[in-house]
Image: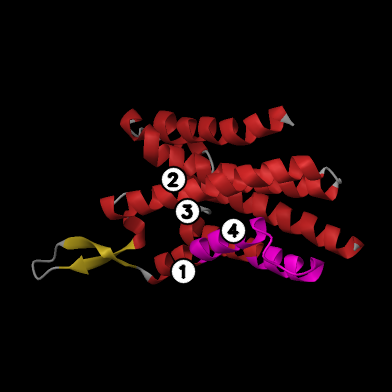
Amino acid sequence: MFNTKISVLLLPLVYAVIRYNLAGGVSWSQLPLFILNKALAMSSVLALFFAATAGIKGHREQASALGKIALHCGIFHVLFTLVLLPAGYYPKLSQVLLTSGGEQVLQMASFTAIANLALFFGLLCAYLFIVISAGHFTGWLQKQLLQYLQVCALAYHLLFLGGYSWFTPSSWPGYLPPVTLLSFICVLLLAYLLQKAWQKR
């Protein structure tokens, strides 16, 4: 149990440092917020996956602990992102304005259509996460529906956020897959596990 907790927190951070700082050349000054935000996002998904695995095996205490880690990592991810967005850390999410002189200027206060979808599904996933964690549902069927919506929202959030880079491995730093792609694969496995568990009910 302890090792699983440490792993879901430490491994994504190590991977993010290797991919972005070492292979990608991102400045070490970006570690406390920008890089850590990517690690927190992946930690949330991993913790959610292992929480579901523990729950299916009947280890309720372990599932609850991992679920809390997933929730807290997710909350910090949302807060960090809200700080980073206005600072221009995610230029691909912003619309490009062409000036009269032919110069391209990013409109930091205006998101692209894809960015709007990515942010919408991200916030929807966070909201459903809180609702499920607080136990605001009546009966197993309603909980199942909320979990299904949460997994779908998370999958779409990752797809719209990073899908553009998933099929261009030559652009990956050190040929290391993006965090969004690894997280998406984890979400697909999570959906498979939940589907198997629901079929047994």
Q: Earlier in the sequence, mark 4 or mark 1?
A: 1
How many angstroms separate mark 2 from mark 3 (CA)? Answer: 8 Å
Question: Which residue has dot 3 on it?
Answer: 165
Instruction: Check the image and report above or below for 21 versus 38.
Output: above
- Rounded to the nearest angstrom, the CA distance separating label 4 from label 2 is 36 Å
The CA distance from mark 4 to mark 3 is 30 Å
Name which of mark 1 and mark 2 comes first in the sequence: 1
Q: Is residue 87 magenta?
A: no
Residue 24, percent across and down? 40, 35
Does residue 1 appear left or right of residue 15 in this picture? right
- Tag 4 residue: 130
* Crowdedness near tag 3: few (<14), some (14–19) or many (≥20) residues, C-alpha within 10 Å: some
Earlier along the polypeptide chain: callout 4 or callout 2?
4
Give, as a single range, the part of the protein colored magenta. 121-149
Image: 1 above or below 165? above
In this view, the mark in front (4 or 1): 4
- The residue that label 1 is drawn on is 117
Please tell me whether mark 1 or mark 2 is closer to you in this view: 1
| Badge 2 element | helix
Residue type, mark 2 in image: Ser
Image point (86%, 46%), residue name = 58
CB atoms of marks 3 and 1 within 8 Å: no
| Element on which disc 1 rests | helix
Residue 52 horizontal/vertical position (percent): 75, 50
Q: Label 2, on which residue?
A: 171
